[in-house]
Image (tube, grey):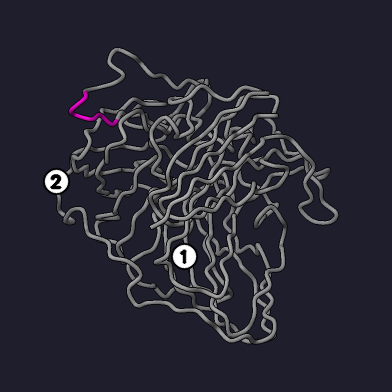
Amino acid sequence: MQTNTLYYKLTASEFEWAITEEKKIRAWGFNNQLPGPVLTAKKGDTLIIKVKNDLAEPTVVHWHGIRVPASMDGTGEVQRPIQPGEEFEYRFAVPDSGTFWYHSHQNETVQMERGMYGALIVEDDADPVVDADKVFMIDDMKLNRDNSFKEGNFFSRWAERHDGRQGDTLLINGKENPVINVQAGQTERWRFINSSSARYFVLHLDGRSFRIIGTDGGLVEKPVTATEVLITPGERVDILAGPFAEGETFPIESLPYNRSTFLKAKREQFATVKVGKFKPSVALIPDILKKIEPLAPKDADVTRKITLAVGPSLKHGIDFLVNGTMHANDKPVYVGELQVWEVFNTSLMDHPFHLHGYFFQVLEDKGKAPDYLAWKDTINLKPRSKVKIAWVPDNRPGMWMYHCHIIEHHEAGMMANFEVIDPNKGAQFEGQHHHHCKN
């Protein structure tokens, strides 16, 4: 297979962005657009991405779901943040096809809320043939009447730390209630990326069924028919949409999901689909999309237990903890050794658990095996529930992290660093203590 080297340039800056023709905001983002440009590559390609920072504060870019070398993961643990006026060159191969994304991993509660994210799509010759391929980045913003970003008082800041920041301005690809045009008779691949800070999105096409064909780590084994699917912050779901009938109009909406917050869950519309004239389809969807070998049996011995918890705090009212501490340091793992982690959420609210740099398989969720096998990097944990995941660290030693992908919970302490060690080389960070302090 021929692989290429692709060059991209991303410039982070503040700019005016029209959410609708009437509504303009001061966004932060890449290349004066929100979301940033869709970066595309073929599986195996090498990307060289020069990021220039024209913001007034430092930033870094995390490549969510890409199996990059540790030094390219775009966190404060592995690189010095890109200072205002500086550039940094990210360079990595893309070993997997699928729907990925990039986003700020510095002062994320501000930078991601304002638009510092974009899609990264990796294609493969083995992908199913579809009539069209569309990316939908889900987001929301919390704006004042004058469309400035809401700052909030003491109580609303406390509520935001507790719930995560969720706004009433609902966006698909940086626009409020856009019209999505499709042609009757066609089958399209729709790639959904939840790039919001805290919103749980239950995809619903007004009752029409669709087929799930991919998750975080690319294609699933075979298409799964559904009428709704939960996509939590950080997660991706690829579906086959259509064929629809000429003249149909229906919403892309999110059904209510109660994640135990102060906010009342409600059904909300994000976009409107309009079906135009009939056009014959060239789509070719195989029965088996790809083979996924199970990493471990459901009853495999657990090698690590991780507890996500919420505790009282004198300073903040509430802290978010991993194994009893904020911004924790977890034990190292060794290249090639099967990891079977049990992640326990003792709190009374949902948390999407995200592992950087590696894919895992879910062995058990609330005591039962998942409906279908998939490669994941983000998994939702319901209140007082356990999930058992399996993964194998391949040979990319260095510092990595896992965290809750509700951005405010991550900032409030629900994250941990750990090192992947090549046993032939030993630890690279002996004696160095990595602390991730925000407070």
- Please tell me in which quadrant of the rendered image residue 288 appears: bottom left
| Badge 1 element | strand
- Please tell me in which quadrant of the rendered image residue 325 appears: top left
Residue to which mark 1 is pinned? 229
Image position of 198 with respect to 82: above or below: below
Q: Is residue 381 visible?
A: no
Query: Residue 77, percent across and down?
Result: 43, 25
In this picture, residue 3 sits left or right of residue 334: right
Image position of 186 with respect to 438: above or below: below
Magenta span covers which residues?
420-425
Amino acid type of the residue tagged 1 in the rendering: Val
| Badge 2 element | loop
Query: Residue 206, percent across and down?
Result: 58, 75
Residue to which mark 2 is pinned? 301
Circle 1: is it few (<14), some (14-19), or many (20+) Cα within 10 Å?
A: some
Q: Spatial distance from mark 2 to mark 1, Cα to Cα? A: 30 Å
Query: Residue 189, percent across and down?
Result: 52, 69
Image quarter in which the N terminus is found: bottom left
In this picture, residue 2 sits left or right of residue 90: left
- Residue drawn at (31%, 19%), measured in percent from left and top? 429
Which is more N-terminal, label 1 or label 2? 1
- Residue drawn at (64%, 49%), measured in percent from left and top? 37
